[in-house]
Image (cartoon, rainbow, N blue to C red):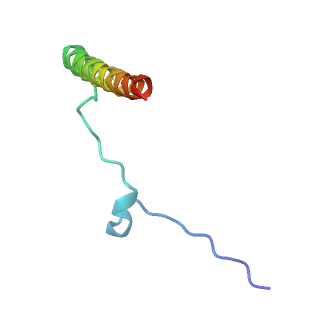
Amino acid sequence: MRIKEQIKYDLSSDQFTYLIREENSTLHKVDIVELNKRLNEVKKSNFWTTTLTVILCLSFLAVITFIGLKF
């Protein structure tokens, strides 16, 4: 029987450069002011979308009610 050879990685060689982790000096922090501004824009957009949908549905309901009462 043949025993499977053990693979040894030499990180200093150029062959395994993809295994080396790059040191990143920047931290990924969230800017709270920017985040709040984006959230407020989304809330306003959702409010107007919901308002428009409700008005549209109520107008369709009014039209259907008017047609139903007419006949």
Residue drawn where x is 24% and y is 23% of the image: 45
The image shows residue 2 at horizontal and vertical percentages of 74, 84
Residue drawn where x is 73% and y is 78% of the image: 3
Q: Residue furthest front?
A: 71
Q: Tell me: residue 21, above or below residue 26.
A: below
* Image quadrant where one finds the N terminus: bottom right
Query: In this rendering, does residue 12 appear at all?
Result: no
Image quadrant where residue 18 sits: bottom left
Please tell me which residue lies in front, 70 or 7: 70
Horizontal side, residue 50 vs residue 7: left or right = left
Count of number-bearing discs: 0
Q: Tell me: residue 6, above or below residue 21.
A: below
Please tell me which residue lies in front, 62 or 30: 62
Image quadrant where residue 67 sits: top left
Q: Tell me: residue 62, above or below residue 13.
A: above
The image shows residue 27 at horizontal and vertical percentages of 27, 28
Residue drawn where x is 29% and y is 41% of the image: 23
Query: In this rendering, does residue 57 appear at all?
Result: yes
